[in-house]
Image (tube, rainbow, N blue to C red):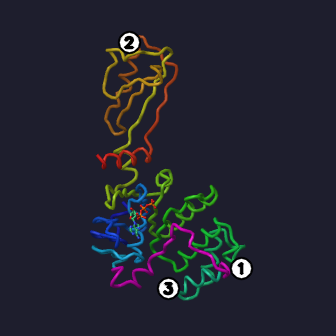
Amino acid sequence: MTHSKTPILQVENLQKRYPSGFTALNGVNLTVGEGEILALLGPNGAGKTTLISSICGISRPTGGRVLVGGHDIQSDYRAARSLIGLVPQELTIDGWEPVMQTIRYSRGLFGRPANEAYLRGLLDRLSLADKADSRVNQLSGGMKRRVLIGKALAHEPRILFLDEPTAGVDVELRRDMWDLVADLKAQGVTIILTTHYLEEAEAIADRVAVIDKGQILLVEDKDVLMRQMGRKFLRVMLDAPLSTIPEALAREGLTLEDGGRTLLYTYDTHAERTGIRALLNDLNAVGLRMVDLKTHESSLEEIFINLVKGAEQ
Ligand SMILES: Nc1ncnc2c1ncn2[C@@H]1O[C@H](COP(=O)(O)OP(=O)(O)OP(=O)(O)O)[C@@H](O)[C@H]1O
């Protein structure tokens, strides 16, 4: 398991109360292992950006502590921050300097020795090699975002934060981003990303943390989460509509939909017996004829919506 390794990040009872009096983080605990990809999910205003800003030392927590590679982000800021790369949500980049110079400058800020070969390789991986001498303010939005990633990686951080990395980007950049994440993971870099695209978390995360109203509702291996909370649906399309479910078929998880034309059977993915065979036998016995069968598995999106809804009740 990835998270049984040495933790690169320890967040302990983190609190953030803004001067307005609003509590954006209310006792967050989170441990992330080296080389892990963690997706941080939560509705708008849940506290994702506040959490990332507090971990990266941009926003000052009002309680608790953050250790990065064992260094306290407040009392040992330089050592902790040098392990971190941050790609912010906003396109906070402009300026007339050329791309290569911008990235070189970012590396220098962390006191890393010059390494042109590394920086060239980085531009290459970000499909920016032919833009090395272009001015940042003359680039497209997508290219600026690539430069931001280059800046975040210029000092070879061990942990990379991506705040909404693919919001509003085109398909190509999204695919490049996912490839880059896989490359970095192969090099042992830890990645924490926030996203509103659940299929993105489903595609690339090892673990998923769900945050709502400044509290972590759950942290779990993605596969375990999908196995435990996932449901499967079997739809049996009938050749003639039913007004009610016949007595002989009645069982838990069975409902009618589509004006009685479809029987919807919901079952647990981890149940020992799904009950499908028995259902199909019973259908046969009562003389119902089906024209088609379809199955569907709940996505991370459905699981997430149910989790956040459940927490509100
Ligand atoms: N400077 C601030 N002063 C007061 N409240 C703030 C400040 N910054 C953020 N908040 C509030 O803290 C809460 C958490 O905001 P945050 O930006 O961390 O959420 P988020 O989960 O990143 O949301 P989104 O998905 O919309 O980006 C929100 O209710 C927000 O209004």
Q: Are marks 2 and 1 in contact (CB under 8 Å)?
A: no
Answer yes or no: disc 2 within 8 Å of ligand 1: no
Kindly state the secondary structure of the residue where label 3 is placed. Answer: loop
Report the residue marked by disc 1.
133
Badge nearest the viewer, 2 or 3: 3
Q: Which residues are magenta?
A: 71-99
Estimate how packed mark 3 is, as few (under 14), some (14 to 19) or many (20 or more) residues with alpha carbons within 10 Å: some
Disc 2/disc 3 C-alpha distance (Å): 74 Å
Name the amino acid type tagged 3: Phe
Estimate how packed mark 1 is, as few (under 14), some (14 to 19) or many (20 or more) residues with alpha carbons within 10 Å: few
Residue drawn where x is 50% and y is 50% of the image: 199
| Sequence order check, earlier mark of 2 and 1 | 1
Disc 2/disc 1 C-alpha distance (Å): 75 Å
- Work out whether 122 lies above or below 22: below
**133 left or right of 70 in image:** right
Report the residue marked by disc 2.
285
**15 left or right of 158 in image:** left
Name the amino acid type tagged 2: Ala
- Work out whether 128 lies above or below 309: below
- Work out whether 108 lies above or below 134: below
Q: Quadrant of ligand 1?
A: bottom left
Name the amino acid type tagged 1: Asp
Residue 69 image point, x, y percent: 37, 77
In the rendering, which numbered label is found on residue 110?
Answer: 3
Kindly state the secondary structure of the residue where label 1 is placed. Answer: loop
Residue 62 image point, x, y percent: 30, 74
Q: Is residue 292 at least partly visible in the picture? A: yes
| Sequence order check, earlier mark of 3 and 1 | 3
